[in-house]
Amino acid sequence: MGAPIIGVIGGSGLYQMSEIEGVREVDIKTPFGKPSDRLIRGQLGNVELIFLPRHGKGHRWLPTEINFRANIFALKKLGVGQIISVSAVGSLRQEIAPGHLVVPDQFIDRTTQRPSTFFGRGLVAHVSLADPFCKDLAATLIDAARSEGAQVHAAGTYVCMEGPQFSTRAESLLHRSWGADVIGMTNLQEAKLAREAEICYATMAMVTDYDCWRAGHDDVTVDQIVAVMHQNAANAAKVLRAAVRAVPAERECACASAMQHAILTSRDAIPAATRKKLDPIIGKYLG
């Protein structure tokens, strides 16, 4: 098996790491429309990286407006086997401070307006999402963060809210009562779709604030978040660099065969147009 092709979904700037060679932009068409922006390809040693700014260059798309299906489908078409998500989150725990990194292991879904599956239109499939992040890829991220001296929390529950407004104080306290650890607006759909596409997925969540639950802590503002994001960017790039170099070429996790027993529709009942549309994802199981 050749060197891995790793997808990175996150903000702009990460692909400007000086070690990345042969940087170029590519347009990808998908049956689900256009991705958030052009994908950026480059080489780090023997690893090919494909970057996708989830909000588009210049941060143009609200979380609800992101075309998650097109983003994941485009990465699948380009041969990506692992996706590292880099995202900003608010902390729901005192010990998870701004500037820390979290590699979550669970989700709570509080979104209401987003397509979260490739399936439908005559094809029913149900993948397991009991463990929504790839444990192997998450372990690689954790090890990389520790090797770079980052303050990293090796597990946590990520609440994915609809936004674009931040939480009310009552909501923030509710999320804490559920045992959640961080809150963001983007990663859940990526994880669900990556599992359907049989792509490993893990998140490097960069903590920017304490949401609004903590007494005596200023309510979150965009200016504060942006300031901490800039502080976190260099740290995130170091961890990402170390993680990419450590990702093995061969995958031994269950992510690569997540769809093997997920399709319920009789093969002869699947519409031809749906078969063709989803061939990069399910073609190997339909013969």
Image (cartoon, rainbow, N blue to C red):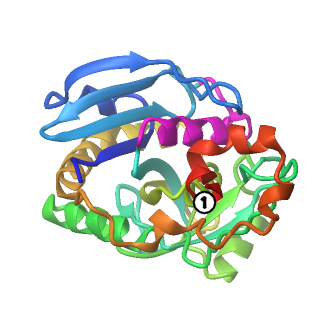
Q: Nearer the viewer, residue 104 or 206?
A: 104
Label 1, on which residue? 285
Q: Is residue 117 above or below residue 51?
A: below
In front here: 267 or 56? 267
Q: Which residues are magenta?
A: 60-79
Give above or below for 126 relative to 118.
below
Q: Residue at x 43, y 19 (%)?
A: 26
Residue 93 makes an appearance in the image = no
Q: Quadrant of residue 129?
A: bottom right
175, 227: nearer the viewer: 175
Q: Is residue 78 magenta?
A: yes
Amino acid type for the residue under numbered disc 1:
Tyr
Tell me the quarter of the image containing the C terminus.
Answer: bottom right
Q: Where is residue 84 drawn, in percent x and y?
A: 40, 51
Q: Looking at the figure, which quarter contains the N terminus?
A: bottom left
Q: How many marks?
A: 1
